[in-house]
Image: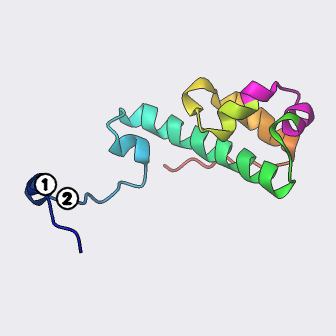
Amino acid sequence: MRATLPEERDVAKRVTESSGNIFLDLGFPPHEAEVMLLRAKLAEALRVWMEREKLTQSEAAKRLGITQPRVSEIVRGKVELLSLDYLVGLCAKAGIPVAVRLAA
């Protein structure tokens, strides 16, 4: 068993319940957080598609008609660099159905 350092004892552990949107939890304005979450979900769907199809980034790029560096951005979750319509278009090319549902 290791000794607890004094600075470790002084650190308070606090857990905050998530809102369900990590971007909102990180302090983004609500309208931005919602768009960022949608982008992240679409990027994740593309990453899962690549994994399921056992595609390299280069192979995925060819199938999607984009560059390998752009695929890398998607895989790394660089959602701030990608628009919603761009990601929806890529999902369509990959055969991933995208449905938009509005809550009133």
Residue for badge 1: 11
From which residue to which does the magenta span run? 59-70
Q: How is the image coloured?
A: rainbow
Q: Main secondary structure of the magenta part?
A: helix
Residue at left offset 38%, top offset 37% = 30
Neighbor class of circle 1 (other Cα within 10 Å; few <14, some 14-19, many 20+) is few
Mark 2 secondary-structure assignment: loop
Marking on residue 14: 2
The kind of residue on which mark 2 rests is Arg
- Badge 1 marks a residue whose secondary structure is loop
Q: Nearer the viewer, residue 52 or 2?
A: 2
Determine contact: label 2, label 1, CB under 8 Å. no
| Quadrant of the snapshot with the N terminus | bottom left
Residue 33 image offset from top left, x and y in percent? 44, 37
Q: Position of 59 compared to 84: left or right?
A: right
- In the rendered structure, find residue 68 and report the number of the disc placed on it: none
- In magenta stretch: residue 104: no
Q: Quadrant of residue 88?
A: top right
Query: Residue at the location (36% across, 33% down)?
Result: 28
Q: Disc 2 and disc 1: Cα gap in Å?
A: 9 Å
- Please identify, in this view, whether the residue under mark 2 or under mark 1 is nearer the observer: 1
Using the image, determine if residue 49 lies above or below residue 90.
below
Position of 15 with respect to 40 (left or right) is: left
Which percent across, then down, holds residue 91?
78, 41
Q: Position of residue 8 (x, y in %)?
A: 15, 56
Give the camera-side residue of 13 and 96. 13
Q: Residue at x 52, y 35 (%)?
A: 35
Q: Residue furthest bottom?
A: 1
Q: Position of residue 19 (x, y in %)?
A: 36, 54
- Total marks shown come to 2
